[in-house]
Image: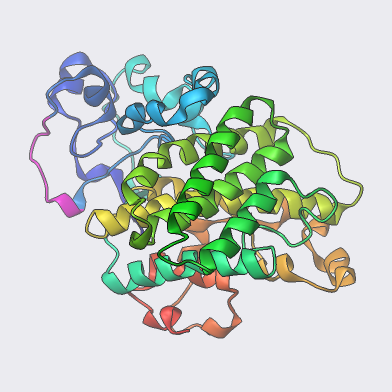
Amino acid sequence: MLGYISSTRKKSCHACVRSKRRCDLGYPCCNRCFTKGLDCTYPNPVQEAQVVFRQATPDLVPASNVNSTKVLQSSSNVSQSSSNSDSSLYQISGSSSPESDLACHDRFPSSHTNILEGFLPQVWEPIILNERQISYLVKKLSSFIPSIAFVGHTPFLHEDLYKEQPFQSYQDSCSLSALYLMKTDKNIPILVNSINTKIDSLITSSAGWSLREHLAAVQALVVYQIIRLFDPDLQQQAFAAKQNGLLELWTAHLWKRSFNEASQFRKCYENWAFYESIRRTVIMSTMVRGAWSSLTQNGLCDQVPVLARLPWTKNASFFHLENLSEFMVSGPCTQQEGGLITYGDYSLKWNPGDDVNRLTSFERMLLSACRGKEDPDLMND
């Protein structure tokens, strides 16, 4: 799923050269030509495999999702308030500024300075997943449904997250997951109508969410999307696909709020469990949409540039610790910046032949998506 390529293998397009603007070398057209509706052609075109897809921080809500506003219905106030910031919401430390994603090419003149290729950043680009990778990814995502139904938690929803305050959206997702496991031809209409009603209720209440309620709502929508996208028996795939835009938007706001709004907890462990759940929920939300893209676009995952930048705690086993004393001695609270690692960096550290048995189910799913071709053992459960 993850790949990168040097940005020096292709020259700026003709339109950017004529306008003396910086070109991001996007394929099949650069960002500037796309937004301005210009004809984008490159000199000495190279093979598609050598083309850089994006150099700027990837947009969280791409232009293709403009029509998704029909899905938002009563949450239009959310989309209006975020119209100028969505493209930067997935940025982490070290990425470009909020304005740079859509406007940097119009503000900076083109530079012809020769730069050593080794000093240029590498750019993540999509690659094609094979059928086995897609099947395994969908299987792992679908396994979250019995997990939340039977035990009330998943690899992106910490078991202690809602012990003291189980929000209604959390309870609903648990109940409907249990109903889904009891699916029959006769109760499918009840299940589908219940999910749609719960989503409508979330949309109606979205303006007043606290940060914790926002997290619970996104987690519930992730569950509902997994049920509807990956089970054709429900005949909800087309409608659910349209609501991927809603999931993307809510996830973007959650990610931004997690940086801008402090949430107070009595213990470091509670604070870490909450924010690690946010990090993992953002990854799983993006992964669900990436899996759907792979399933419907011949293996192409369009979420790779976002996924590669998303972080989680490096030692994934902390998420399932039963002995809190071990967490307090060696856990993220004792480490600078919580011991985080990005998906992209984590994938590069894996070597085919490494012991897959030491991985958690969360790590195994992520690695199978990006390294499964090189190491099929990742998909041998």
**Residue farthest left in this picture:** 44
Q: Position of residue 32 (x, y in %)?
A: 27, 23
Q: Is residue 44 magenta?
A: yes
**Residue farthest front in this picture:** 186
Asked if 110 appears above or below 321 in the picture, the reply is above
- Judging from the image, the colouring scheme is rainbow
Q: Residue at x 77, y 59 (%)?
A: 332
Is 187 or 180 nearer to us in this picture? 187
Quadrant of residue 110 within the rendered picture = top left
Q: Is residue 308 visible?
A: no
Q: Residue at x 26, y 54 (%)?
A: 296
Quadrant of residue 331 within the rendered picture = bottom right
Q: Position of residue 226 (x, y in %)?
A: 46, 57
Q: Is residue 292 visible?
A: yes
Q: Is residue 241 magenta?
A: no
Q: Label the magenta part by its dominant secondary structure.
A: loop
Q: Position of residue 213 (x, y in %)?
A: 70, 39
Region in magenta: 41-49
Q: Is residue 48 left or right of residue 373?
A: left
Number of numbered discs visible in the structure rendering: 0
